[in-house]
Image (tube, grey):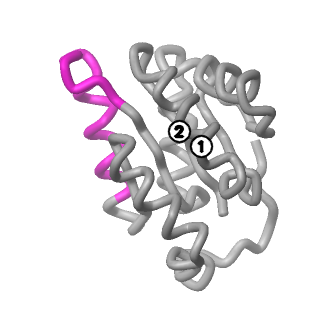
Amino acid sequence: MNIALIAHDNRKELMVQFCTAYAGILARHTLCATNTTGKVISDATGLSIHLFMNGSQGGDEQIGARIDCNEIDLVLYFHDPNSPEYDASISYMAKLCDKNRIPFATNSATAEALVLALGRGDLDWRDIVNPKTKPFMA
């Protein structure tokens, strides 16, 4: 499955800890992330991650376009609820995920439930509703 990883600045360390804890599951999937988040995760975990632009430079929109085309199967977006300037980006991602029935987590507790479900095969239905006819391309 294609998994998008996004984290606001003060949630990047939490995302690194999360990806470290679940590297065994995440490594079996295709990962993409906004630039800074992806580099931090990759450096800390060794996971292979396709990097888009930084979120503030269009990376959120790049991932959003993939979501809108139903090319992403799971989004983990660790956002800062105390930062109002990010309200638009989180709303944008949530709407796109809702439109395409893409599981979407905005905190580590929900992300854990989704990643554990992914590991058990509970999200395999995404391959039925969204068969991969070509590999994830950047």
- Residue 91: which numbered mark, if any? none
The residue nearer to you, when weighing 25 against 29, is 25
Residue occupying image coordinates x 59% and y 28%:
34
The mark total stands at 2
Q: Residue 69: percent from the left, percent from the top? A: 55, 58
- Residue 18: which numbered mark, if any? 2
Q: Residues within 10 Å of mark 2 (few under 14, many from 20)?
A: some
Residue occupying image coordinates x 34% and y 63%:
99
Q: Is residue 119 above or below residue 30?
A: below
Residue occupying image coordinates x 45% and y 61%:
114
Q: Mark 1: which secondary structure?
A: helix
What residue type is disc 1 on? Ala
> Which residues lie in the magenta part?
79-97
Quarter holding residue 16: top right
Q: Image check: 102 left or right of 62?
A: left
- The residue to which callout 1 is attached is 21
- Which quadrant, please, contains the N terminus? bottom right
The residue nearer to you, when weighing 72 against 121, is 121
Residue occupying image coordinates x 78% and y 49%:
137
Q: Is residue 50 above or below residue 110?
A: above
What residue type is disc 2 on? Phe
Q: Main secondary structure of the magenta part?
A: helix
Q: Image check: 18 left or right of 93?
A: right
Q: Residue 28: percent from the left, percent from the top? A: 76, 59
The residue nearer to you, when weighing 118 against 134, is 118
Q: Are marks 2 and 1 in contact (CB under 8 Å)?
A: yes
Q: Residue 120: percent from the left, percent from the top? A: 57, 75
Q: Mark 2: which secondary structure?
A: helix
Real-space Cα separation, disc 2 to disc 1, in angstroms: 5 Å
